[in-house]
Image: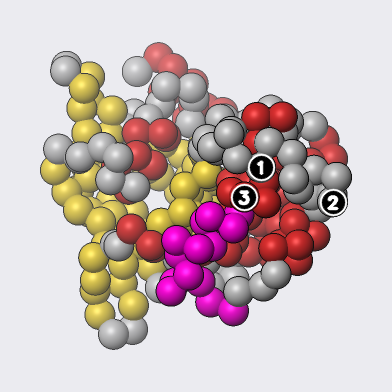
Amino acid sequence: MELVIEHLSKHFEKKEVLRDIDFTFTKGKIYGLLGRNGAGKTTLFNCLNRDLKSDSGRFYIREQAGEREVKAQDIGYVLSTPTVPEFLTGREFLKFFMDINEKEIQDPRPLDAYFDYMGIGPEDRDKLLKDYSHGMKNKMQMLINIIARPNILLLDEPLTSLDVVVAEEMKQLLRNLKAGRCIIFSTHILELALDLCDEIVILNRGRLEEVDKENLDTGGFKEKIIDALREEEHA
């Protein structure tokens, strides 16, 4: 399975944010999407999630059987600022999600098994989501995407504000999730991308370009990325 983007463009008034993007993402990998703040990473995600309408171009899924349109259930989207219904408890939210998606969920498990998997303790499962920490809300976002099993998982700066322990837990979780799906991990932190991701892609002057990781150990790899990001700053 591949996510194929062809000639995707998006502008806001006179500013062209995405410029004729062509790229193919392949399942089984975590792609680190690097770019400076304001480079257009979230805009790209919003176009792929159809929260924004692109000005031109298209994207689709390519499988052995041929090409097909990206459906809503193909996409999972984890925002940097978790969005959860804070008037519900963790258990109520999880049950509600599973009830409304009952026909699509494969091999459903008991609610407590999911909480155990995410490391959310019994004392927190019946608390209101408004009383959850940022990291715990992020875990709930991740949990519903794990249950939904989307083919494409978009992660918009999901680890930036987490403490060290939760961030490490989330990184290991993502490594375990990548088989069979395409994960695109947006960040502006180079070291995080190098630690977690299989491939590095830079959003530079509105276009996506992959950076070869072959020379990672030579010391030239980081410099190449930083140079590209500096070009973006002065473009």
**Discs 3/2, front:** 3
Disc 2/disc 1 C-alpha distance (Å): 12 Å
Return the residue at label 2: 122
Residue 12 can be seen in this image: yes
Near-viewer residue (219 or 72): 72
Near-viewer residue (105 or 190): 105
Instruction: Give the residues in magenta.
Output: 94-107
Return the residue at label 3: 92
Choose the circle earlier in sequence order: 3 or 2: 3
- Residue type pointed to by label 2: Pro
Q: Is residue 217 above or below residue 178?
A: above
Residue 214 can be seen in this image: no
Choose the circle earlier in sequence order: 2 or 1: 1
The picture places residue 68, in percent across and down from the top left corner, at: 24, 71
Disc 1/disc 3 C-alpha distance (Å): 5 Å
- Residue type pointed to by label 1: Thr
Return the residue at label 1: 89
The picture places residue 49, in percent across and down from the top left corner, at: 34, 47
Q: What residue is rendered at 53% in x and 55% in y?
A: 96
Element type where label 2 sits in the image: loop
Element type where label 1 sits in the image: loop
Q: Are marks 1 and 3 in contact (CB under 8 Å)?
A: yes
Near-viewer residue (230 or 91): 91
Q: What residue is rendered at 41% in x and 34% in y?
A: 42
Q: Is residue 111 shown left or right of residue 149?
A: right
Q: Is residue 178 shown left or right of residue 111?
A: left
Disc 3/disc 2 C-alpha distance (Å): 14 Å
